[in-house]
Each structure stands twice: as structure tokens, then as C-alpha cells.
Amino acid sequence: MSRRHVLSLTAASRLMILLMALLPAILAAPPSLAASPLGTYNIQSGSITTSGISSGAVMATQFHVIHSSSINGVGIFAGVPYGCALGLVAESLNCMLYPNLIVMANLYARVSTYDFYANIDSVNGLVNDRVFIFHGTEDSVVNPGSGDNVETFYNQYNSQVYKKNDIAAQHCMPTDNYGGACDQLNSDSYINNCGYNGAFEMSNYLYGGGLRRPSGNEAIMSNLIEFDQSEFFEISAPSASSMDTVGYVYVPTRCANGAQCKLHVAFHGCQQGREEIGNVYAVHAGYLEVAELNDIIVLFPQAIKTALSNPQGCWDWWGYNNYLYDTRNGNQIVAVKRMVDKMTGFFI
């Protein structure tokens, strides 16, 4: 065999090895040809709220604290307080497993420093904001005592806190019509049927009551749209910040036709993003039915896993992107803010 042929085979072998290495990532999150630019809508002033489960719950409280002058309420399912990890992986484990070891004064000091240097909005923006906390008594991933720490944190800033912690639920987003057994760990989706519509109860509290309760079949699947998240990254690809190229947004029919609507930002938890389970969280966590009945546009930003720093596709709440992760300069915070800015047509 000639030297030329040997070189060709070697090059081909290297190409095959490269393709095999990339194959899992390609198959895990296939590019969507349907992803379109995120739209701008008629958003009601003072109506922006946020929520999340697990790492998404911490991301929601980060988004709320950082932009408290514009974000008017937060729902926290199986989460920990803002700033709890202090930028340390080891401390994040204490937040989740040993909440009694958390020194709340350290979190208040972090907030005070960030407030002084304008890394977050003034803490005055947290006063009277509505905070909804859900934490199951059977949670084996995040100790239920963490919910008490979240309550303590927000009471420090005179927010209006409601805590639901009397349901025998595992680590999950609770619904009344979908998911695994309420008290069992359902690692397929971390959505459990607890006979409790968490998305509705949370939304109804955040918006002051009076929302229409869904029966479970109100969502219109064609109103769930894939949008291009790449638009919101100016220097690097979304993957550099552990975010997907595609996100989801649900636009109720009346909102799509120009009616004035509310806006809610919903953050999935670890292993719940598009890369892992497709649109299962967006479709089945309970948000869509509430949204369609009550004119609430729901934005579902999407995170992805990275091999070393974020192997479970969590949101950044311990600093795997950079040390400014829980300030207005955090990579993921900046991207989601740009999404909200575009949707509202003004800068939050």
C-alpha cells in the first residue's frame, strides 16, 4: 500500500473518531429548523414574574433579586436561597443537604455588597414582592429545611411570602394530572402527580388571586414556539455559557393577536432541558393551561450540560460560568434579560 493511501486512511480514521465523539451531543439536542426569532408583545406593566424548580428555582431567585425593580414576584419549587453557594461547589452541597449549616448573615452581606456596587437592583425592590415557596416533605435531593431558609431570606427584605410545605412530595414540580407518584423520585422528568397544581397555585398567588383555574386541556400546542437563543449572545455561542441554541415560549391566542398580557419566565431544573427530555417540562409542568386561560406569556429559557463544569444541565448558581454569576453581569442572567427586553420592547 502506498504512503499516500496510508495517510488517507489515517485522516479518515481521525475524522471517524471525531464524528463518534460528537455523535452523543448531536443526537441529544438536534438542531431545530423551526426555531424563529423571539417576538415582541404587548406586555402589561408590572406583570413580569419568574419561577423555577431546583437549580431553576435558584436561577429564578437570582433573576428576581438582580432585577427586583422589574420582576414583581417569584415562585421557588425545591430551591435554596439567593447567594447560598457563595460561588463554591462545596457550599452548594451544604445548601442542598445541610441547610442548618447555612449562615444567613453571609447571604445578607453578599446582597448588601452587591447592592452597594450596583451589581443588583436596590433591595428596596424586594419589599412587598410576592414569593411562593413549595417544598415537599419527602425531598431527598434538596433538604426540605432549605425552603425555610428561602422564607427567612425573603422575610429579611419584607417580601410577602407564602410557603407550601405540607405535601409528601419528592424532589419535583407538582401537578394534578401528570408525572410520577408524588412521594417517589421520578428522574425521568422530575414532574410528579401530587393532586396539586403547583403552576396554578403559584401563578394565582403571584398575581394577587382571581386567576381562572384550568381543567387540564386548555393548552394549544401550536402556541408553544421554539425560538433561537443564539440571538442573545453577542460574543460567544450559547454553549459557552451552558445554554441551548433553542428555547421555548408559549404565546396564548389572545396575546398573539395583540391583547395586553402578563409575562412569566419559567426555569427548568437540572436534567429537564430540551437536550435531556425535549419539551416535556414545558408541556407537562402545568404552565401552559394556566397561561392560555389567563393571558400569560411564558418564556422557557433552556440550559444544557457541559462535560466538566455542568454535567447535569443545571443553571449556574455556584459559579461555573464566572464569579459574577449571581449579578447583573452573569452570563445566563444577561442572556435571559435580553430575551425579556425584546419581548417587552423596553429594558428591564
Image (spheres, rainbow, N blue to C red):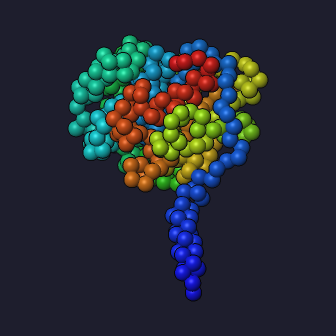
Q: Residue at x 61, y 20 (%)?
A: 344
Q: Residue at x 35, y 39 (%)?
A: 318
Q: Is residue 99 visible?
A: yes
Q: Quadrant of the N terminus?
A: bottom right
| Residue nearer the viewer, 249 or 323 | 323
Q: How many marks?
A: 0
Query: Horizontal and vertical percent for residue 347?
Result: 55, 18
273 is higher (above) or lower (below) than 120: below
Q: Residue at x 68, y 18 (%)?
A: 42
Instruction: Determine the residue located farthest toward the front in the rendered image.
Output: 3
| Residue nearer the viewer, 22 or 104 | 22
Q: Quadrant of residue 340?
A: top right
In the figure, is residue 259 to the left or right of 71?
Answer: right
Query: Horizontal and vertical percent for residue 119?
Result: 37, 22
Query: Horizontal and vertical percent for residue 208?
Result: 54, 18
Q: Quadrant of residue 117?
A: top left
Q: Is residue 277 visible?
A: no
| Residue nearer the viewer, 336 or 211 | 336
Q: Residue at x 25, y 35 (%)?
A: 102
347 is higher (above) or lower (below) than 77: above
In the figure, is residue 77 to the left or right of 89?
Answer: right
| Residue nearer the viewer, 205 or 119 | 119
Query: Horizontal and vertical percent for residue 16?
Result: 56, 69
In the figure, is residue 236 to the left or right of 263?
Answer: left
Q: Quadrant of residue 224?
A: top right
